[in-house]
Amino acid sequence: MSTRTLPPEGGRTRTGAVLAAVCLAGVLLPVSLTGASVALPGIGTDLGGGLAAVQWVVNGYDLTFAGLMLAAGSLADLFGRKRMFGGGLAVFVLCSLLGAFAPNVLVLDVLRALAGVGAAGVLTAGSAILAQTFDGAARARAFAALGTAFGVGIAFGPVLSGLEIGSIGWRGMFLSHALVGGFVLAVLLRHVKESRSPEGGRVDWAGTFTFTGSLFLFILALIQGPQWGWGNPLVIAALVGCVAGLAAFAVVEKRQERPMFDVTLFTEPRFVAISLVPVVLAFGFTAVLMFLPSYFMSVDASSASDAGLVLMFLTVPTLVLPMVGGSLTQQLSNRLVLSASLLVTAVGAAWLTVIGPGSSVLALAGPLITVGVGFGIPLGILDGAAVSTVEPGRAGMAAGMFNTMRLAGEVVAIAAMGSLLVSLTRSRLADGIARFTGDYSGDAGSLTDDLVQGNLGATADSVPAGRRDAFTAFAADGYTTALHSSLWLLAAICAVGAVGIALLLKDRPAATRSLPVPDGTAEGTGTTEGTGTTEGPVAAQARPIAA
């Protein structure tokens, strides 16, 4: 039996409160992302600003969330997981509270970016807290519960946010995020026991700045490219700076005695596969989730709440399927489950090209559910598998690496999808907008911005009544055609990703890692957890990560 035991104080009540704190935070973080996407049309109307400025409400949050994940993991290991969890949540709550009273879009963008800083600390420290608090099969259940919590946030984020926006406005939505986070701070955090890495060390600030800076420049280029033009010197400089920053990051990490990004893990194909799965899924699921609300609001004149309700077909499978995914890996190989999930997502994205002006809910239900199924199954598998690749003292680092890959994939997917939609829509509209000269005072670029922000209705009202229907149909057709092209590309990315993941997870006996079994005895080592001689904590499914 394992020599590792849970701290006696508090017993099951304490561990239950710990799980509740981490999972409630796990619900809140994706709600803040998906809710902001539904709120963008209202924010743009109230605060003004161009398309790029409004998009930074979502992208700023996701960018700092992803870019600081590794630093947050290192800080959690060094200075305490509870301290990092509580501090990060306090930052998130404060920024959400202040965001509700933001006087302009620039202030809101800055506050959202700072909220992402806090979210990075919450997620990384929370994963490490679960790895430290729970053992054996209980750890598997805890990580599956965390995956379900993310599913809840993703599933109900759009509809809850839509209802809030319809009743109390987008400012009230941010206030609700602050209230939920404040409850976790005030009521549940006191049950969490402090823990840190016994190995000491320091934060890799050079690696943090080069990595985050590179990611920022890349996202800046993707967002501003369609606005400024891809040949704009600033866009080119941002792309060049991104490449230079990544090169500097690689050099910095090679010189670190204890780098925040343990590149040796990326020599193992299975860890690469686990890290790439959420990146590929971000293109098939997250990008779709971010941009469908504005499509429904522009093309079908839907309200925020109605758009959120339709998206439940996409998101509800993420609520019920993480537990199913964990069970499937007990019967089938990880290779089959993960690659099949990517293929299902690809099929759903391709099927979603049936979308068009006036599409019925029934016509959209099938493809949206299919995409949700493909995304939901891996949610209960990946987090625990990633944390299980290292010893318990570096659980924060492992969680940081995996979640950085996941969130960086989301940032890139959202920015790339937005850039592609804007470029394709603008090109399509430029071919025929001359027909409305004298009726519409803007150009293809301004019309595209209004479409992607979900504001076609307000724009169409400025067109003479006799030409309004033709103008609306023209704009909707251009946006729909661009969306179809984007969906086909997303489907191709997921299909190619499925093949790549299957190849990376192909059985290689020499590379198979032996991880501890449920009773704490490591296969092939004869050691027990807690003695300091095991290679890593119990895997999410309490067995080796194998093909």
Image: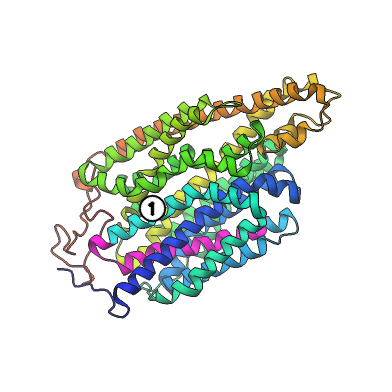
Which residue in the protein does label 1 denote? 148
Q: Which residues are magenta?
A: 109-138
Quadrant of the image for the N terminus? bottom left
Identify the residue at image location x=36%, y=34%.
498
Residue 173: percent from the left, percent from the top? 61, 56
Is 535 on the left or on the right of 208, as rendered? left
| Residue type at the position of mark 1 | Thr
Residue 259 in view here: no
Q: Is residue 504 above or below residue 463?
A: below
Colour scheme: rainbow
Q: Is residue 135 above or below residue 200?
A: above
Is 177 on the left or on the right of 451, as rendered? left
Identify the residue at image location x=65%, y=46%.
40
379 or 362, which lies in front? 362
Please identify the dominant SS of the magenta region: helix
346 or 163, which lies in front? 163
Q: For residue 125: magenta?
A: yes
Residue 99: percent from the left, percent from the top? 66, 60
Residue 390: percent from the left, percent from the top? 31, 60
377 or 467, which lies in front? 467
Identify the residue at image location x=32%, y=60%.
142
Is 246 on the left or on the right of 341, as rendered? right
The 10 Å Cα crowd at callout 1, few under 14, some 14 to 19, many 20 or more, is many
Q: Secondary structure at mark 1?
A: helix
Quadrant of the image for the C terminus? top left
